[in-house]
């Protein structure tokens, strides 16, 4: 009887999603539904509540590391993999929708273009966007993982990309996964070094955009990039 009731609850939750989407789901119900696909036999409601209690929000659950997730009783590697797959899939989905060809002639447009590329990332990542004379995107690639500094960022790689795509200008962007959208002294020094290297090639650095969650700062707008 208990197993029949358990299966009935799962079927009702699945059918509710098929009819309504997630708009009226509580966060723990969304997790509960997701966990059906990694926890076949057990009730996932309790585990969903444990995850929400530990991390505080749905986004924090998805942003947690594999190690932190697997410290929760009942979370094994297949469950943590499923959870981490969600933001990674969403990022790939959004990136697939923002193919080269967009016109990025303002910091706001560049931010909106870049934002999906940082979804679910828990370390600093540096992107370079190569633009033509009308600010159309010709490429957008990662050039660095980890600490953003003039020593760590591969400026030669940035220059090579810009020349390969015959760029007129370049936008650099990186994220502050656990911080604020504020430029550090190191960020400014790195920006100056990149701008100087590109200028020698006749290519303009038009902006360096720092993104923290859904906020950004444009170093062009605050006068660092001129």
Image: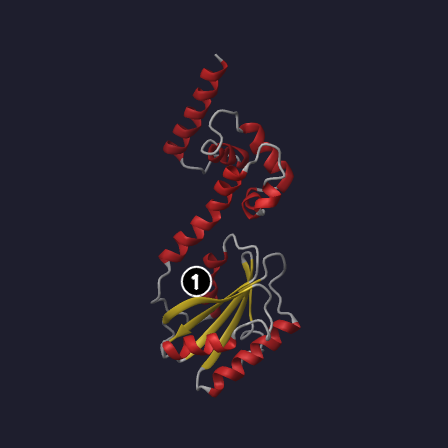
Occupied quadrant, residue 130: bottom left
Percent from the top left, x then y, of residue 26?
52, 34
**What is the residue that sits farthest to the left in this orientation?**
101
Query: Residue at horizontal 51%, vertical 68%?
Result: 173
Occupied quadrant, residue 110: bottom left
Q: Is residue 46 left or right of residue 6?
A: right
Percent from the top left, x then y, of residue 48?
56, 33
Mark 1 neighbour class, 10 Å CA radius: few under 14, some 14 to 19, many 20 or more: some
- Image position of 26 with respect to 193: above or below: above
Percent from the top left, x then y, of residue 93?
39, 52
**What is the residue that sits farthest to the top in this orientation?**
1
**What is the residue that sits farthest to the right in this orientation?**
185
Q: How is the structure coloured here?
A: secondary structure
Query: Residue at horizontal 62%, vertical 36%?
Result: 72
Query: Residue at horizontal 41%, vertical 70%?
Result: 104
Residue under label 1: 113
Query: Residue at horizontal 46%, vertical 58%?
Result: 117
Occupied quadrant, residue 51: top right
Q: Is residue 21 visible?
A: yes
Q: Is residue 151 left or right of residue 107?
A: right
In this view of the protein, which residue sits in the foreground, 161 or 101? Answer: 161
């Amino acid at each position: 009887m208990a197993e029949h009731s358990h299966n009935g609850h799962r079927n009702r939750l699945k059918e509710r999603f098929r009819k309504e989407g997630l708009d009226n789901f509580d966060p723990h119900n969304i997790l509960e539904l997701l966990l059906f696909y990694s926890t076949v036999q057990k009730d996932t409601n309790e585990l969903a509540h444990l995850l929400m209690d530990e991390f505080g929000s749905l986004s924090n659950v998805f942003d947690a590391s594999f190690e932190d997730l697997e410290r929760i009783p009942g979370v094994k590697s297949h469950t943590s993999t499923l959870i981490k797959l969600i933001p990674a899939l969403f990022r790939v989905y959004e990136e697939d929708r923002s193919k080269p060809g967009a016109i990025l002639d303002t910091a706001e447009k560049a931010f909106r273009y870049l934002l999906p590329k940082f979804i679910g990332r828990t370390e600093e990542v540096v992107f370079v966007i190569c633009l033509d004379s009308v600010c159309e995107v010709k490429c957008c690639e990662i050039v660095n993982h980890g600490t953003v500094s003039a020593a760590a960022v591969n400026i030669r790689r940035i220059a090579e990309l810009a020349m390969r795509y015959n760029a007129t200008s370049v936008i650099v962007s990186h994220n502050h996964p656990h911080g604020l959208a504020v430029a550090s002294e190191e960020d400014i020094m790195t920006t100056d070094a990149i701008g100087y290297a590109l200028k020698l090639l006749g290519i303009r650095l038009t902006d360096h955009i720092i993104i923290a969650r859904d906020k950004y700062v444009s170093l062009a707008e605050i006068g660092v990039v001129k």
